[in-house]
Image (cartoon, rainbow, N blue to C red):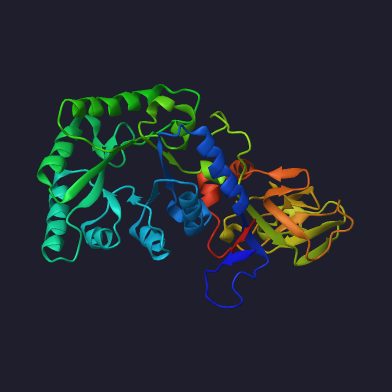
Amino acid sequence: MHTNKHVNNEFSGIRSAWVEIDHGQLIKNFTLINADTPSHLKKLCVVKDQAYGHGAVVVAQAAVDAGYDYLAVETIDEAIELREADIALPILIFGEVSDEEFSACVAYKITCCVNDISKAKRFNEYVQQGSAEHTSQAFHPVHIEIDSGMSRWGVRWDEAFSVIEYIANECEHLYLEGLMSHFAMSDEADKTYANLQHSRFVSVLEALEQSDITIPLVHMSNTGGLLDLPHAHFNMIRSGILHLGVYPSLVCKRIDGLAPVMSVKASIPALRQLHEGDCVGYGMHFTASTPMQIAILPIGYGDGYPRVRNEGYVLIHGQQCPVVGGNAMDAMMVDVSHIPDVAIGDEVVLMGGQGDEWIDPRDLVKWKKTVCYEILTGWRARLPRRYVG
């Protein structure tokens, strides 16, 4: 076991609450996705937001080892972290980069999206100047994002061709490497809107076919598209949370053997005997109706656990232990009256498996009333990451 150290000292990662990453399961998940994905497709691994809380460098290296072709992040700092960890695979920044970020993109060989003519002109001039000064490469790869109905990043599908044409023909220092789009809802049973987005994206590709412009990479499928929309795979797919063993919905296709990589655990630092009438926690949301025993856990909503009140449970000795009272920023209380041999130091599972029981990220989704993505990314950096397997 080793720990991802957020503070560089010999005592880093010894906290009695932590996020545990099963590296062996991560490798297995990549293998299963490879076996399920047509071999002619290129594969991009999304590692933004610390690979959804799992550790960007660790997941990126696993993707490299699994034969992936591309990585994607959301910010320039995320891209630089990978480069400084000696990750050489091409890296795409989603969204929009500012003009101030051009220099870092060029210096670290980071691909970015350029979605309008004005920005393309400015970026081309920047790369041209660097090339003339012999401080940079002669051209820089860019992708164009087509807004096919998400109304977020990109150029609207029916206005896209002029941008494509300008970058391809007028920006000699930009290499138009990729064309992409993004589904708003690809993982639900009703594919009506996903198919509408697909048809809009295809209309751009059909216009390209009437020109002499060739774009090597075409990608639209996120995890939901990868699983459920093979007609939208084009020549590269993007894996976001799938390799982490989490599905984007309850109804999308499943891959046998895929399992979650992340668990959240703690050890019990204190036990309390309650008398009848004792109150628990801020706001006195729980009052003991009989004598009972509770365990105090060193983790709370400041670490990313849902801010629940008398809702949810953890696993101790392979048994469900309900949360009592309202959890605090740094602590939560659970009922252990039914576990006679519970002891200080016992392992607690807040997400993951213990014995025959399992707490899925989707269980926390219900308690926090959110989505899986927020559960995974919501575990704060003050929880050390421990890698096993």
The residue at the far right in this view is 340
Q: In this image, 14 relative to 243: left or right? A: right
Residue 159, quarter of picture = top left
User: Residue at the location (33% across, 50% down)?
Assistant: 92
User: Residue at the location (45% across, 34% down)?
Assistant: 39
User: Residue at the location (70% across, 56% down)?
Assistant: 284
Q: Is residue 81 above or below residue 49?
A: below
In the image, 238 versus 213, the foreground residue is 213
Where residue 194 appears, as percent x and y from the top left, is 39, 27
For the image shown, how many numbered marks are present on the structure? 0
Q: In this image, 380 relative to 287: left or right? A: left
Quarter in which the C terminus is drawn: bottom right
User: Residue at the location (79% across, 49% down)?
Assistant: 318
Where residue 230 appears, as percent x and y from the top left, is 43, 27
Quarter in which the N terminus is drawn: bottom right
Whether residue 236 is visible here, answered yes or no, is: yes
